[in-house]
Amino acid sequence: MRYLSLGDTDDIAASCHHLTFGGTGLVLDAGMDPDQDGYAALPPFELLRDRPVDHVVVTHAHHDHLGALPVLSREVPHAQIHMSRPTAMLAEMLLPSSARLQKRRVREGSTSAAPVFDVEMAEALSYVYETHLLDAPFDIAGLKAEGPLAGTFYHASHVLGAVGLLIEGYEGGTRKRVFYTSDTSLQPQTILPEADYPDGPVDVLLLESTLGADPEAETTSRKAEEKRLGKAMADVLEGGGVVLLPVFALGRSQDMLALIDRYKRRGVIDEDVPVYTAGSMRGVAEIYDKTRESTPRLDPEFEVYGVDQERYPRTNKKKAEALSRPGIFVLTSGMLFERTPSFDLAQQIVGDERHGIFFVGFSKEGSPGDRLQIAAASGEKMTFDPDEGPVEVKARVERFRFSGHSHRRDLIEVVDRVKPRTVVLVHGETAAKDWLKDNIEFFHPDVRVIIPEQGQEIEL
Ligand SMILES: [Zn+2]
């Protein structure tokens, strides 16, 4: 069995892995780096040219796992593409919208990078997705497979449709098993229950590492964070201010709407406070609702679209009106990337102490979201627009922990549960992988732990 990382290996960027298993070539995920534009954002697909690719499996619809799929499919048009049904529904919406965004950004002059695929290509692709239910094995044997090879999806929590993948088949005459967690949460969220894993042992575990260097995550309880956020929001709203929650369109935004609904029903915040949402998160919410009876839920009755919400105002006049009274803005992007609604609104409200900007997800080092949190904590100024220069941070800026990822003790627990012979650490910064490697080796001295380098093939 051979493993090759095509994605970034020292960062949380594009996820993409190649596995040769008993003569079959598999690509797991086809992500794009959200920090880059055009071809620079793609995994180095040219490395696949002298390797077999029979099947592609996409574990969930986040851009860093799905975004490059149309380009990958152009490289290996014969490969079959597998995903869960909700992921296919999301991809059908998100990939054409990514193509439109790439084109618009060139037109607006905000990037010089040519689009890497167009709307027609993304739409045509949705006809070839093969979807599978959870816990139901499907055939992924390639043309030169030694024998049968099966994939099975396991509920990964994280976001709607997210799955872990178990691969079982024969290599060199022996039966082998590989489990890829992808992004996964061992704790229940507001809408989705916790992840499910296969029984061990497995030969190889591909384990995500996102929160490996985050000691605080493992000591924070979600319940306590829910309470703290509810109180902070109520304080700002009662003081006449507005609350901005920067979120990812897929996952965190639906989770926050469910939480706001809970706060309103419990009287933590006033039922009449308007909630503003924008863009693709509204379409994503519809897909959450359409699949509420066919996918794992904590409460199948709950509908995201059932939470009263208004469209984020487009005109300055309407925006000023909305900002003149208490209100909650659930806007993308989660890390406050430039030219996004959350960046725009943060810039507008940051200088007024009545307002609150509350981060509820991960902010990558160096992102505007991360810079704002550092500026607020140290009392320094923050630069949104280089032409306008640094501005004072007067709004209340805080971070709350609502990760859709497992904290690092839970990641060690995944190792305890699935009992791998070898662990390959993926999707995390270097410090995160180093912590996990040390701890897995400490608790399981007989397990081989590998931190792969991009482009380097490893014999497993
Ligand atoms: Zn993800």
Image: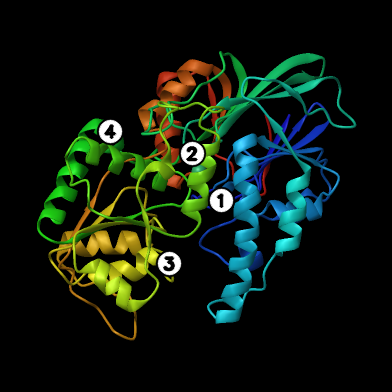
Q: Check the picture and name the quadrant holding the C terminus.
A: top right
Q: Residue at position x 15%, y 44% from top?
A: 231
Establish if 347 lies above or below 335.
below
Looking at the picture, which amino acid does disc 1 mark? Asp
Front-lying residue, 278 or 339: 278
What amino acid type is highlighted by mark number 4? Arg
Tell me the kind of residue under disc 3. Thr
On the image, the x and y values in percent for residue 114 come to: 67, 73
Q: Which residue is mark 3?
A: 340
Q: Give the residue at the far bottom of this rendering.
A: 387
- Residue that lies at the very extreme toward the right in this rendered image: 143
x, y percent for residue 78: 86, 45
* Residue tagged 1: 64
Residue at image point 31% right, 78% down: 317
Tell which of 364 and 399 is nearer to you: 399
Question: Is label 2's Cβ within 8 Å of ligand 1?
Answer: yes
Does residue 213 appear in the picture of this structure? Answer: no
Q: Residues within 10 Å of mark 2 (few under 14, many from 20)?
A: many
Please state if 163 lies on the left or on the right of 130 as rendered: left
Note whether ligand 1 is within 8 Å of mark 1: yes
- Real-space CA distance between mark 1 and mark 2, rounded to the nearest whole angstrom: 13 Å
Measured Cα–Cα span from mark 1 to mark 3: 18 Å
Picture coordinates of residue 431, whole percent (x, y): 40, 44
Q: Secondary structure at mark 4?
A: helix
The tag earlier along the polypeptide, 2 or 4, is: 2
Q: Secondary structure at mark 1?
A: helix
